[in-house]
Image (cartoon, helix red, strand yellow):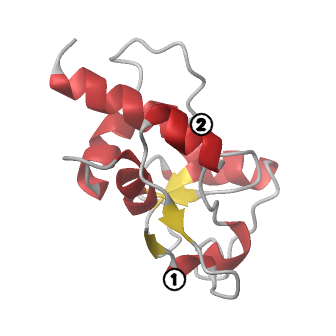
Amino acid sequence: MSNENSLYERIYLVVSQVPSGQVTTYGDVARLVGGACDARVVGYAMADLGKYPTSLPVPWQRVINAQGGISTRGPRQRQLLEEEGIAFTEKGRVDLARFRWRGPEPAFIAEHGLTALDWPEDAPPEQGRLL
């Protein structure tokens, strides 16, 4: 397996954990994956979904940009998110404080060698940081 395939599999593994009714950002996925992954690589992996075989269900529509906006596949992505109960503002953005996923359970993070996101109890999700 090439390094790109391995990295994409880790990205798809993280995205497969995002529950219905929640979203994550390209940057959050990249921080969870760690290593050479950045938000742009996550975007490439989402664009290439289907080119690489994966047995995981990958809810691509739940990955949005850091401003709460849809970066690709516009109307279809918005429709899928709205069907999951995610609301958009008048400016077409998702309220990240309300709908942002805070990452997988600690046991899943440890099992898969991911990097945990630290979300202080009283901080809004957009202020998360790496441990």
Which of the pair 62/28 is nearer the observer? 28
Q: Secondary structure at mark 2?
A: loop
Q: Indicate the quadrant containing the C terminus: top left, top right, bottom left or bottom right.
A: bottom left
Viewer-nearest of discs 1 and 2: 1
Q: Residue 111: x percent and y percent? A: 53, 33
Q: Tell me the residue at 41%/19% (across/down).
A: 50
Note whether 55 is above or below 81 in the view shown.
Answer: above
Task: Say which label, 1 or 2, has the lower sequence index.
Answer: 2
In front of the other: 117 or 6: 117
Residue depicted at x 72% and y 45%: 19
Where does the N terminus fall, quadrant-wise?
Answer: top left
Residue 38 location, x and y as percent? Answer: 26, 54
- Visible residue check, residue 76: no
Q: Which mark is residue 45?
A: none
Q: As rendered, which of 67 and 6 lies closer to the eye?
A: 6
* Kind of residue indicated by mark 1: Gln
Residue shown at 62%/74% (left/top)? 96
Q: Which mark is residue 59?
A: 2
Q: Is residue 22 visible?
A: yes
Q: Are marks 1 and 2 in contact (CB under 8 Å)?
A: no
Which amino acid type is marked by label 2? Pro
**Left or right placement of residue 72 versus residue 17 in this view:** left
Q: Which residue is mark 1?
A: 127
